[in-house]
Image (spheres, grey):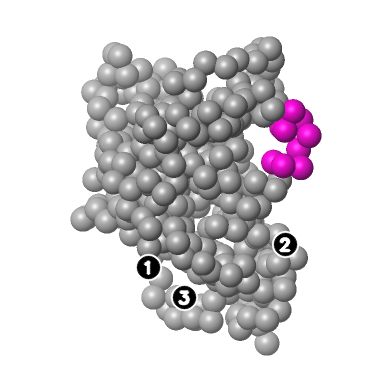
């Protein structure tokens, strides 16, 4: 019979699994945090703090923004590549990531439109310049495209740099003001990791095993989506030939869902802690809420980021942060930093319909806003809501 896990246990399990159950204090172990999560998504938008910084700060509030760039520049702890989006990944995982280089290269090779635009770039010349001059950013090249009015246009040199980056020929050397510098992979990735030759079947096994370890539970689609470095069929074949625990987990509406779990799931359930009662401001790209379907089933929290929704059609706002207290999402808040003035502006605030906001909760929110302002060097909080 499948192990049955009720909704209350599942919420606790998920917050423990994603690192949000503990109070975000104590010694900072940045590399371990990234390894525990598997990867941290990168995002360009600096509404208050960029998503990757906010995600790490949410696990330990001793984190500060320069730390991730310093870790990347060291060229031994993390590398950048593409999961479901651009991400930083523990360097130790690199040998099991080489199939992703091939997958993405093949995908781009099959795109006639991409290849047509790429044909306007001189890839050998671009690579030669990097080899001779060292790591370069896109600003070092000057090719342009006629489609520069389109939202997602890329000049030919940018397409070429990205193509070689996706294929693993180039790697991110470092970043300056979030600008990416490309270098030859062998000058970024340590030789003992870059030269390992792990066969494809073993890489699939590692990708699936490490995904379910970091999810704690999920079906084949959940496992596939975690890294987005395998196909669904590959995951299904892996699951059929692997010892896993069959479970049924309860949604907040009482529905039971079948899923896989690691063999030690009962031990995990025994050792989970009650989530901290501290109120938390969660980033829209946080791994705990990335899967909006799982989020809704576990917490009855219906959420999406509306940055690409026209202003007139938004239900909430441009960049709205979920508010987490204990094992419940209790509200949403729209924030915007004015770094020149040193202000953290509260644009809008909403409480969930089934949650009462008393003085204690308001005090907790005020304290978290103070901590967030301090994190990014702001000195004043303005409520314009």
- Taking the magenta stretch, the answer to whether it contains residue 63 is no
Q: Residue at x 58, y 46 (%)?
A: 167
Q: Give the vertical position of 274 relative to 117 (above or below).
A: below
User: How many residues crowd mark 1 within 10 Å: few (<14), some (14–19), many (20+)?
Assistant: some
The quarter holding residue 230 reads bottom right
Q: In this view, does 97 lie to the left or right of 156?
A: left
Which quarter of the rendered picture does the N terminus lie within?
Answer: bottom right
| Residue holding disc 3 | 269
Q: Quadrant of the C terminus?
A: top left
Q: Which of 218 and 67 is in front in this view?
A: 67
* Numbered-mark total: 3
- Residue at 67 percent across and 75 percent down: it is 239
Q: What percent of the width, then of the height, locates residue 144? A: 60, 15
Q: Identify the residue position indicated by label 2 in the image.
A: 232
Percent of width and height locating residue 210: 51, 67
On the image, the x and y values in percent for residue 160 come to: 59, 31
Q: Can residue 236 be seen in this view?
A: yes
Upstream in sequence: badge 3 or badge 2: 2
**Which element type, helix, strand or loop, lies under badge 1?**
loop
Residue 57 in which image quadrant: top left
Locate residue 26 relative to residue 201 in the image: left or right: left
* Residue at the spot of label 1: 273
Region of the chain picked out in magenta, as a range: 108-116
Q: Identify the element where label 3 is drawn.
A: helix
């Amino acid at each position: 019979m499948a192990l049955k896990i009720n909704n209350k246990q599942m919420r606790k399990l998920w917050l423990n699994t994603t690192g949000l159950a503990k109070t975000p204090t104590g010694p900072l172990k940045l590399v371990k945090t990234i390894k525990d999560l598997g990867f941290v998504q990168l995002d360009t938008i600096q509404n208050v703090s960029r998503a990757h910084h906010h995600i790490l700060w949410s696990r330990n509030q001793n984190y500060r923004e320069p730390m991730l760039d310093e870790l990347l520049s060291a060229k031994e702890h993390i590398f950048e590549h593409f999961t479901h989006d651009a991400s930083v990944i523990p360097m130790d995982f690199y040998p099991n990531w080489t199939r992703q280089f091939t997958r993405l290269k093949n995908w781009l090779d099959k795109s006639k439109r991409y290849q047509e635009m790429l044909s306007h770039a001189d890839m050998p010349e671009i690579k030669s310049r990097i080899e001779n001059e060292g790591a370069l950013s896109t600003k070092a090249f000057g090719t342009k495209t006629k489609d520069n009015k389109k939202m997602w246009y890329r000049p030919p040199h940018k397409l070429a740099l990205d193509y070689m980056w996706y294929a693993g020929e180039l790697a991110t050397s470092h970043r300056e003001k979030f600008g990416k510098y490309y270098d030859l992979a062998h000058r970024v990735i340590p030789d003992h990791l870059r030269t390992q030759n792990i066969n494809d079947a073993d890489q699939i096994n590692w990708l699936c095993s490490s995904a379910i370890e970091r999810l704690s539970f999920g079906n084949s689609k959940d496992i596939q989506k975690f890294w987005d470095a395998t196909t669904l069929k590959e995951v299904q074949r892996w699951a059929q030939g692997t010892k896993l625990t069959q479970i049924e987990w309860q949604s907040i509406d009482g529905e039971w869902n079948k899923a896989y779990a690691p063999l030690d799931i009962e031990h995990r359930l025994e050792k989970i802690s009650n989530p901290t009662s501290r109120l938390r401001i969660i980033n829209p790209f946080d791994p705990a809420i990335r899967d909006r379907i799982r989020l809704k089933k576990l917490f009855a929290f219906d959420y999406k980021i509306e940055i690409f929704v026209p202003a007139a059609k938004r239900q909430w706002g441009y960049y709205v942060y979920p508010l987490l207290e204990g094992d419940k999402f209790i509200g949403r808040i729209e924030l915007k930093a004015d770094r020149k003035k040193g202000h953290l502006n509260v644009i809008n605030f909403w409480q969930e319909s089934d949650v009462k906001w008393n003085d204690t909760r308001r005090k907790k929110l005020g304290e978290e806003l103070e901590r967030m302002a301090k994190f990014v060097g702001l000195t004043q909080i303005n409520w314009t809501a």
